[in-house]
Structures are given as structure tokens and as C-alpha cells.
Image (tube, rainbow, N blue to C red):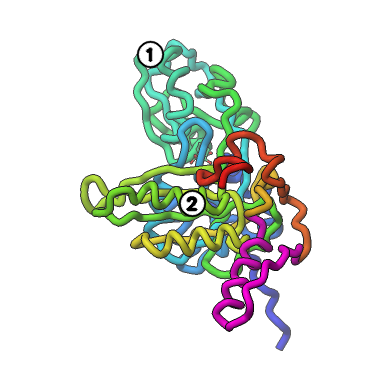
Amino acid sequence: MPAQPDASPVYSYLGPVGTFTWTALNQAPEAVGGEWRSVNNVGEALDDVISGRSIGAMIAIENSVEGGVSATQDALASIPGLRITGEYLVRVDFDLVARPGTALADVTTVAAHPVAYAQTHLWLDKAVPTHAHLPATSNVAAPTALLNGSPADAAVAPHGITQHLALDTLAEHIGDNQNAVTRFVMVSRSGRIPERTGADKTSIIVELPSDAAGSLLDMLEQFATRGVNMSLLESRPIGDELGRYRFVIDLDGHVHDERVADALLGLKRFSPRVTFLGSYPRADRRPVVLESRYRDEVFIEARDWLRGILSGEPDGEDAVEDAGEALPGLVVRELDDAAPGQHGADDQGPQAG
Ligand SMILES: O=C(O)C(=O)C[C@]1(C(=O)O)C=C[C@@H](O)C=C1
């Protein structure tokens, strides 16, 4: 019997074609040649991954105006077995569009994806002060619906959408922040962790013991004392009772970096729940800068020293040797070189005892 050709891998994304999520998926090398499945919300995209219908889902996780996308953060916290395997950045730029013949003065109802609405509402409040908002499932669903009987008079859409849809542009570049960027992540089922590059991020979600004073500080100390920088720290209600929050955290570094692994072990010892969402290369490829005392070799040498003591060897002061290959994205600084403010919280400077 002739061998069946392998089915191409399926990737789910918030569609239809032309959304910012679709633009992000275009950046993912593994999605080239795959089948792209358009869905209506983040939950559906993640369900596809969990059920095995798709091998990956591209989802928006953070934008430079609104911060974390709460629907995404909550879904990642509550659905077990998901892993972030890559991140992608997309500049977001919006226009207000309408059916031909509509003037700005005619607009009373504006269709918009809720996140897009939040990113344009200052402009809308000024230019269309009495408008009502009609939520849409995406930035392309909103203008498409205008051609399919939507009661809205206008829609917030990605800049340039009128090249593809028979609509007119009422105003261009209406975003409240002209430099707005949205961060997207590719989410797959738990499994292989992408190799470290030296310019990596690790995403985790942490719950804290509810009855222990100072546990937020305990959590932050795990990172500070290992020289691990945080690039995102947000709290989200857990939802079971008032006043209970979980923390969504991005760390500079990879779980295969000794300092990051050690910090995660420290967290795990007192947090009732640590969810590891993944380690993956940074979209901006910005190298991680760390002081030499947080290099892998320093952690390994300290462990070897203790092992030696436990096995009865004399306590010698071994020099820290460079082990392993250098990572292209990593910049290591001697303590004296570190710029002010880049020391860990426990560091009072080189002269401190
Ligand atoms: O509607 C789109 O185009 C999307 O890709 C969704 C989304 C989001 O969920 O944040 C993506 C980028 C913008 O920040 C606004 C909306």
C-alpha cells in the first residue's frame, strides 16, 4: 500500500486572515507550510491545542498600552499542559473604517475588538464623543461584519484593511499610542523546551500562601538573590474568593540557566502552586546581562563544593572554571562593571562584606 502523505500540522489563530494574530503567525517559521485554522477567541485556540486538533496556537499575551491580555493570562493559568514555545512582536496601527458613503458625523455605533477599543478609546471619545461600542471577536471580524448586516456604522480595523474590503477609511492611525506593540506567543502542548540562546525568557505563574505575611517579598527575593531580572509582573484574581491573586511573571533567562532553575526551586519550596509556562527565545533577541557571580559555573562550583564536603573531601577553594560553550545572546559583567541599579537586591556593591 502506498504510504499516506503526512497531514500538515495545524495552527490555530484568532482570525480571519489579516488580524494582528495572523500577522504574528506569519513570523513563526514552524507554521510555514502548515494549515492555519481561524478561530473566534483565545479559549477556542487553546482548546484546539489541548484536544490535539492543532499542534500550536498563536495568541496575544501583552500589549504596550493595556499590559497583559487578561483572557490569555487566565486561560494559561487554568488550563494545564500548555507550553509557550516562542514569542513574536507586532506593531499595531488602527484605522476607523465604514461602508462607502458614511461620514464621521453619521457614526453612532463603533464595532471593535475589546482590546482594540481600549487602545483607541481616547481618539474615539474625542472624535465621536457620543458613540456606543459594539464588541467584535477580532479587528478583521469588526470591519467584515459591516458588509454583512452589522448594526454598527463604523469599525476599528488594522491600518490598510480597505485594500482588502470594500469599505472607506474615515480616519487613519487612530491608536492612542502610535508606538503600540502587541506581544504574541506560540502555545503548544507540554513537551520539548526550546534550546537556550542566552537571550531567552521564562514565563511562570505563581500563587502565594494566603496566610503568610511577607510572602510577596519572599517571592521577589528568589529572583533578586540569584540575579534574575523580571520583565513582567502582573497580578490576576484567582477567582475563588475575594483578595486571592496569582502572579504572572516573565523572567530574563532560560530554565536551563542555573540561576533561573535555582530561583524556581526556591519558589517551589514555599508557593502552593508554580506553573511553568515555558522558556523560549526573546522576540527582540536582546541579550541577557548578568553579573559574573550569577554565571552557571558559579552555581555548579558551589554545588560541587558542598558535594565534596558531604563526601568527606578536604574543603578547598576551587577556582571557578569556564564550563560549556558560550551562549551568543549572553553578556556577563564583572561586578565592578555593572551599571548602578543592576545589582541584585542583596548587593551593596563590590566593597560590601
Ligand atoms: O483582532 C486582532 O487583530 C487580534 O489579533 C487581537 C488583538 C488582541 O487580542 O490583543 C491583537 C492585537 C491588538 O492589541 C488588538 C487585538
* Residue furthest out toward the bottom: 1
- Which amino acid, by three-letter code, is at mark 1? Pro
Q: Is residue 174 left or right of residue 76?
A: right
- Within-10-Å neighbours for mark 2: few <14, some 14–19, many 20+: some
Residue at the spot 44% in from the left edge and 41% down from the top edge? 137
Residue at the spot 51% in from the left edge and 58% down from the top edge? 263
- Residue nearer the viewer, 56 or 203: 203
The answer to whether residue 41 of the structure is visible from this angle is no
Q: Which mark is residue 153?
A: none
- Where is the N terminus found, in terms of image quarters? bottom right
Is the residue 213 above or below the residue 187 in the image?
above
Counting from the top left corner in percent of width and height, residue 170 is at: 54, 17
- Residue nearer the viewer, 163 or 295: 295
| Closer to viewer: mark 2 or mark 1 | 1
Tell me, yes or no, whether the highlighted magenta stretch contains residue 321. Answer: yes
- Which amino acid, by three-letter code, is at mark 2? Val
Span of residues in magenta: 294-323
Query: Would you name the residue on which mark 2 appears?
Result: 39
Q: Is residue 106 left or right of residue 316?
A: left
Is the residue 99 above or below the residue 204 in the image?
above
Counting from the top left corner in percent of width and height, residue 244 is at: 27, 49
Query: Would you name the residue on which mark 1 appears?
Result: 129
Q: Are marks 2 and 1 in contact (CB under 8 Å)?
A: no
